[in-house]
Amino acid sequence: MTNFTRYLIIIVASAAGVSGNAYAQDIPYADINSIPLKEKAHTKMEGSPYLSDQFMKGTVVFKDGKIAKNINLNFDQINGAVVFKNESDLEFTFVTPVKEFEIPLIGKFRSGFPPAKGTTENTFFKVLNDGKTQLLKTQKKAILETKAFYSGVVEKTVVEDVKYYILKPDNKPTILKNDKNSVLSALKDKETELKKFIGKGFNFKNEADLISLFDYYNTL
């Protein structure tokens, strides 16, 4: 091996090492691949398209494996898009596809699940239970237009549609009605144990109770 060949190998190895380290590091605002929101859509209507009334600190995991932490995040529930504010308080959308984002005060949201009724691989589910059998939730919004009878003015209102899903291993998300019969039927392999766990004060319409049931189910 010539000295020149050894020199080239050292350069390539060094470059690979730098690339690997950069890949594992958090992405600063300036390095995020994004598109500015030039117009604030949905402003002339009643209600908000966003998940939260305010942007909150969170973490984004991109499909290429990179991570952006401590970002001011929100979620456009009409367009199904993760948005953020930069250090100048301007709103942007991400160019690099987002796999998962988490806002500690709200929860963790993930895409990439097998397509199911009413969803695609790009749909973000709120992960209520991340065990072997998962409890998921979608929170979508749409614009409802109504025309006033006398004035003919079109009024726009944001309406929300919430659905729960169950995802068992090697399956796809299935819509789950949050009532006793539907839930116990979906988890019928442990129905006897779950009936004992439920007791008298359990409320299947209460999300916290539903999460606790899945937490218990995944321990059986």
Image (spheres, rainbow, N blue to C red):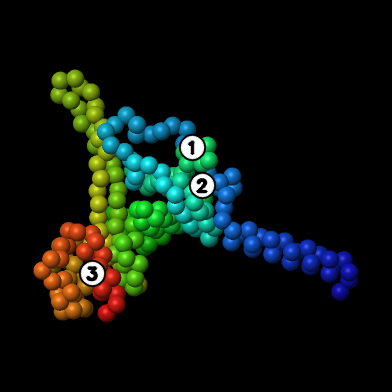
Q: Residue 113, relative to residue 139: is it above or below?
A: below
Foreground mark, 2 or 1, reads 1
Mark 1 closeness class: few <14, some 14–19, many ≥20 residues within 10 Å: few
Report the front residue among 105 and 131.
105
- Which residue type does callout 3 highlight? Leu
Residue for point 23% across, 23% down = 153
| Residue 124 percent coordinates (x, y) | 37, 54
Question: Could you give the CA–CA distance between mark 1 and mark 3, rounded to whole angstroms?
Answer: 41 Å
**Looking at the image, can residue 59 be seen?**
yes
Q: Is residue 5 left or right of residue 56?
A: right
| Residue 189 percent coordinates (x, y) | 21, 78
Q: Earlier in the sequence, mark 3 or mark 2?
A: 2
**Looking at the image, can residue 35 be seen?**
no
SS category of the residue bearing label 3: helix
Foreground mark, 3 or 2, reads 3
- Which residue type does callout 1 highlight? Asp
Residue highlighted by disc 2? 95
Residue highlighted by disc 3? 213
SS category of the residue bearing label 2: loop
Location of residue 201 by image quarter: bottom left
Asked whether the residues under the numbered discs 2 and 1 touch, taking CB atoms below 8 Å apart as contact, a structural biologist would say no
Q: Is residue 139 left or right of residue 9?
A: left
- Quadrant for the N terminus in the image: bottom right
Question: Could you give the CA–CA distance between mark 3 and mark 2, rounded to whole angstroms?
Answer: 38 Å
| Residue 141 percent coordinates (x, y) | 29, 44
Mark 2 closeness class: few <14, some 14–19, many ≥20 residues within 10 Å: few
Q: Earlier in the sequence, mark 2 or mark 1?
A: 1
Residue highlighted by disc 1? 89
Residue for point 18% across, 79% down = 193
Q: Is residue 50 left or right of residue 186?
A: right
Residue for point 53% across, 40% down = 87
